[in-house]
Image (cartoon, grey):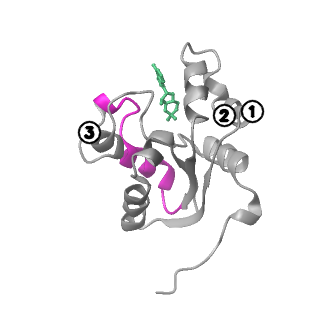
Amino acid sequence: MEQTFVMVKPDGVQRNVVGEIVSRFEKKGYTLAGAKLMTISNELAEKHYGEHKDKPFFGELVDFITSGPVFAMVWEGENVIASARQMMGATNPSDAAPGTIRGDFAVQVGMNIIHGSDSSESAEREIGLFFEKSELQSYTKTI
Ligand code: CMP
């Protein structure tokens, strides 16, 4: 089954929207395979955001994502990679539609509450960066 990496950023954790975001994914019908509250090291942040290393905002991005705890998750389900991106809304919250997570909870592009993998290659890479295999659960819903 398809899996994706989703992370509530330090702004989302500090604004107490972790529960709301988990709830949206649960209600949609996805299955939680892994989750943890953690503080990202500079090394991990630079690997995770490696594709942006030449962008002018790279330093700001790494400083922000390492500034406080994040809530890292792996969600599983049919078409979950693309669907999670739709649920999150546009990267710039000013362009994100109402009803999406960024549309409802954020204003600035640098503090846009949530990150989600943008492709199956990114999902595999990001899940591997943040989670050991032993931290992920595989189970069938019986109720
Ligand atoms: P994310 O989905 O985590 O992936 C890369 C992040 O870079 C993105 O969300 C934004 O938070 C951030 N970002 C994109 N553009 C800018 C910008 N112009 N200034 C600061 N941060 C940005």
Q: Which residues are magenta?
A: 76-94
Q: Is residue 112 left or right of residue 136?
A: left
Q: Amino acid at mark 1?
A: Glu
Q: Residue at x 70, y 32 (%)?
A: 42
Q: Which mark is residue 45?
A: 2
**Residue 105's spot in the image, x, y percent?**
32, 42
- Residue at the disc numbered 3: 97
Front residue of 26/107: it is: 107
Pinpoint residue 69: horizontal percent, then vertical percent: 57, 45
Quarter holding the N terminus? bottom right
Mark 1 and mark 2 in contact (Cβ < 8 Å)? yes
Q: Is residue 96 above or below residue 24?
A: above
Badge 3: few (under 14), some or many (20 or more) residues near its Cα, within 10 Å?
some
**Going 64% across and 44% down the picture, which residue do you hit?**
39
Residue 79: percent from left, percent from top? 48, 56
Q: CA distance from mark 1 to mark 3?
A: 33 Å
Mark 1 or 3: the one toward you: 1
Residue at x-position 65% and y-position 20% = 53
Q: Is residue 117 magenta?
A: no
Does label 1 or label 3 sit earlier along the sequence?
1
Q: Residue at x 61, y 47 (%)?
A: 123
Residue 78 part of the magenta segment: yes
Q: Amino acid at mark 3?
A: Ala
Q: Secondary structure at mark 1?
A: helix
The residue positioned farthest toward the left in the image shown: 98
